Image (cartoon, grey):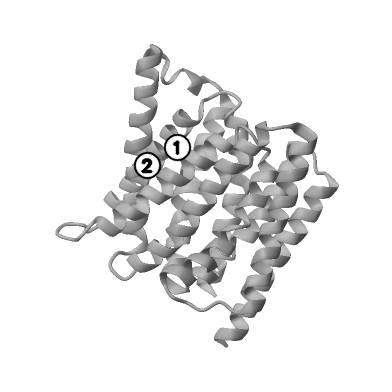
Amino acid sequence: MKPYLAGVGFATIFGFSFLFAKEALDYVDPLRLLAFRFALAALVMTALTLCGVGKVNLWGKDLRPLLRIALLQPVAYFVSETVGLRFVTSSQAGMMIALIPILVAIFSAVFLKEKTTLPQWAFILLSVSGVAVIVFMQQVREGGASLIGLLLLFCAVTAAAMFNIVSRHATGKFSPFEITFFMMWTGAIVFNAMAATSHFFAGTLADYGAVLIYPDVWIGILYLGLLSSVVAFLLVNYSLSKIPASQSAVFANVGTVVAVLAGVGLRAEPFYWYSALGVVMILTGVWGANYFGDIKSG
């Protein structure tokens, strides 16, 4: 039961992360939010290592698998997600994240040569159609701004799906703690370098940490840095070390439900009839794709 409980845990944490990110983004630009978040996460992982909670032994090992993981997650994923959240609501972001298990199934078929049944592909098409309904109706109602956000979120979803594939391969060579440690430090270095460079050329480097006076920024950094980075990714990598990537990825659906409920309930974000239809289509497609996958494997 532990890998499945870990799946529920990381999905719930990720579901609320959209809410905290949206609150913080009212005061801070996306790059600095990522820089502060992963700097805190890297320091916490280092402290856990020094206290003996986890062990890191990377000396003499081929680090290319870890580098591939880190470039996908956190670098590619979080740049796309955090910038995309400026254009869409947190509930819409949660709906897009529901596509991760579908893309994992597709990538598993392409890269791992796993066979996908006809009913699975039918449900995959249903889930993708659900996203198309949301995108089209959102354009009719609000214009082109949200399309930019949804495209960025789709890039994030693609990076997350590829992360599940490459991380599953790396679990035979590295422990979940080592993978998470490398991810957090890569994020801290890359995002702080990007943010500092951006502010240097804008002539605002002296104000780099000025936004830390706002409570919403601190709350967001603490939640995203401690829970959504350290705890959640330890759970993700633990889950991927115990069960197949397609099974671990399906827990993103729990995050979708949490994100939608949090956005509507706590931020009073709008929820239209086409949003409900899209959610039903996405989740039904995800359920069907994994249900018929279990029948095939069973």
Which numbered disc covers residue 37?
A: 1
Say left or right for 183 vs 118: left
Q: Which of the 4 quarters of the picture holds residue 151? A: top right
Identify the residue shown where x is 56% and y is 34%.
219
Q: Is residue 59 left or right of residue 105?
A: left
**Mark 1 surroundings within 10 Å by alpha-carbon count, few (fewer than 14), some (14 through 19), many (20 or more):** many
Whether the residues at callouts 2 and 1 have beta carbons within 8 Å, the answer is: yes
Q: Nearer the viewer, residue 17 or 218?
A: 17
Residue at figure coordinates x 54%, y 71% from the top left: 247
Q: Is residue 155 above or below residue 252?
A: above
Say which residue appears at 55% left-offset and 41% top-offset. Answer: 152
Looking at marks 2 and 1 on the same chain, the residue that comes earlier in the sequence is marked by 1
The percent coordinates of residue 21 (x first, y second) are 58, 37
Quadrant of the frame with the N terminus: bottom right
Q: Is residue 269 visible from the viewing direction of this image? A: no
Provide residue 233's location: percent of width, then percent of height.
Answer: 45, 55
Tag 2: amino acid: Gly
The image position of residue 10, as x and y in percent, is: 54, 57
Looking at the rendered image, the quarter that the C terminus falls into is: bottom right
Taking the image as shown, residue 44 lies to the left or right of residue 260, namely: left
Q: Is 233 drawn above or below residue 79 in the view shown?
A: below
The residue where tag 2 is placed is 187
Residue 140 visible somewhere in the drawing: yes
Dividing the picture into quadrants, the one containing residue 206 is: top left
Q: Quadrant of residue 174?
A: bottom left
Left or right: residue 168 compared with residue 263: left
Q: As displayed, is residue 81 above or below residue 295? A: above
